[in-house]
Image (cartoon, rainbow, N blue to C red):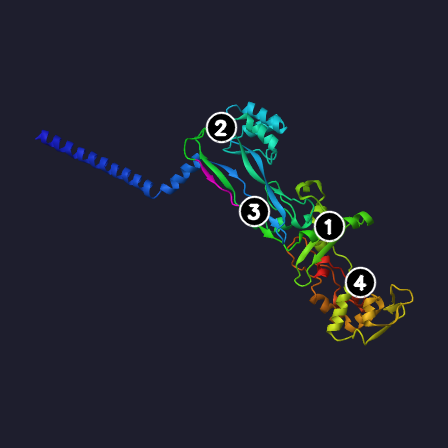
Amino acid sequence: MGDDMFIKKMNERMRFVLVIIIMMFIIIIGKVFYIQVFSYDKLNKYANDLWSRNLPLEANRGNIYDREGVTLAGNVTTTSLVLIPNQIKDKEKTASALANILEVPYDDMLAHTSKKTSIERVHPEGRRLSNLVADKINALKLDGVYLVKEAKRDYPYDTLLANTLGFVGIDNQGLSGLELIYDDYLTGSYGAIKYYSDAKGEKLKLSQKYEQPQAGMNITLTINYKLQEALERELDNAINMYNPDGAWGIIMDPNTGEVLAIASRPTFSPLHYQDYATEEINRNLPIWMTYEPGSTFKIISLASALEENLIDLDKDYYYDTGSVKVSGATIHCWKHGGHGHQTYLEVVENSCNTGFVSIGYKLGKEKLFKYIKDFGFGVKTGIELNGEENGILFDVDKIGDLETVTTAFGQGVSVTAIHLTI
């Protein structure tokens, strides 16, 4: 009887152990199934992140063309230095060799070769290397030292259209002008050379993958290179002849409003923007500099009066004595003694200030300033360039006759060249 009880208890224990073992197998198999089916993508990504390494390949920035396809901003291929510190067997020797070639302090280069990182860019000394320097580095055949191709922005005509084109930084990011405004379009997508390495950084004998960089979008401007070149030449002539503080100009198609050329002085070289003062590289004078338009503004007053049928150029007359008093102030015509009896067409031809005083009176301040605002003065034009100014107009509610008539011949208001051109 005792033996039977012992055997029975043993069988129960064995069955219990067997059940436990079976349950453990079921749990293990279930876990393996869960890992293989449900967690595969996640764990595979983790594994790839541990093993995979990328050598980044910079994309070409989009080109900027004139209306005829002339390249105003393009790219040239350069070489940059990239290190994989774990693959560098002799960090001191490698640092010394690279420091000598790049002409940088040994300690700085040793910091790069010894850095605890998977990939180390030598910045800025190792960026945009000349062919001669790149060939010297390549000839050393150093472990963990790589040369990768990069695009460098190029401006074939140097200072031409510089204030409008703008410039880019060391990482090809737009910092000013069209390069900044259209940076999202011009910037391409990085590519990479992907490979696998172990924990020590040693390259594994697995497939290497090349992902081609995607160039940015190209942009075509309304600018005409030949007209731009002519405008810049004439600005240079004006600077050389009169030595002004600044000069600027715009050429526009009157039928479409397209800007065919725009330039200012001083200018700068986009490839060497670090050598210039901030105001020289960030001020596009035709859209930034405000000034009294003077007689060029008279066409606005004239058009307003004609639209209101206040004058007839051939039938209505004005007698110019050479001066006129307005609110206690004397306004003179440029011709001593005046132009005498003249039609309003002759008032325009003679650019007679006193004649435009009479036009200002005829319009009155409300109508005059309504037309000025309708012509777009006092607000930004919306041209796709950064740094545009509004200009300055009198507050209609706070001015009298004197401010009204001086505005009629372009004094007391402030405009930009782009305002006046359009």
Q: Which residue is mark 3?
A: 187
Residue at numbered disc 2: 87
For the residue pair 30 and 48, the one nearer the viewer reads as 48
**3 or 2: mark nearer the eye:** 3
**From the viewer's perspective, is 50 left or right of 250?**
left
Q: Distance from label 1 to label 3 (Cα)?
A: 29 Å
**Residues at marks 4 and 2, CA–CA distance in whole angstroms:** 73 Å
- Circle 1 packing at 10 Å, graded few (<14), some (14-19), many (20+), is many
Q: Is residue 265 left or right of residue 7?
A: right
Report the mark closest to the observer, 4 or 2.
4
- Disc 3 to disc 2, C-alpha distance: 32 Å
Indicate the secondary structure of the residue bearing disc 2. helix
Q: Earlier in the sequence, mark 1 or mark 2?
A: 2
Question: Label 4: how many residues lie within 10 Å, few (<14), some (14-19) or many (20+)?
Answer: some
Q: Is residue 412 visible?
A: no
Per the rendered image, the range of residues in magenta is: 208-214
At numbered mark 4, what does the secondary structure look like: helix, strand or loop? helix
Q: Which residue is mark 4?
A: 295
Mark sitting earlier along the chain (3/2): 2
- Amino acid type shown at disc 3: Thr
The mark that comes first in sequence, 4 or 3, is 3
Earlier-in-chain disc, 4 versus 2? 2
Decide: is 39 above or below 17. Answer: below
Amino acid under label 2? Gln
Secondary structure at numbered mark 1: helix
Q: Tell me the residue that label 1 is attached to.
A: 232
Which residue is found at the position 21% from the left and 37% from the top? 19
Query: Relative to 254, does residue 75 appear above or below in the rendering?
Result: above
Q: Is residue 209 magenta?
A: yes
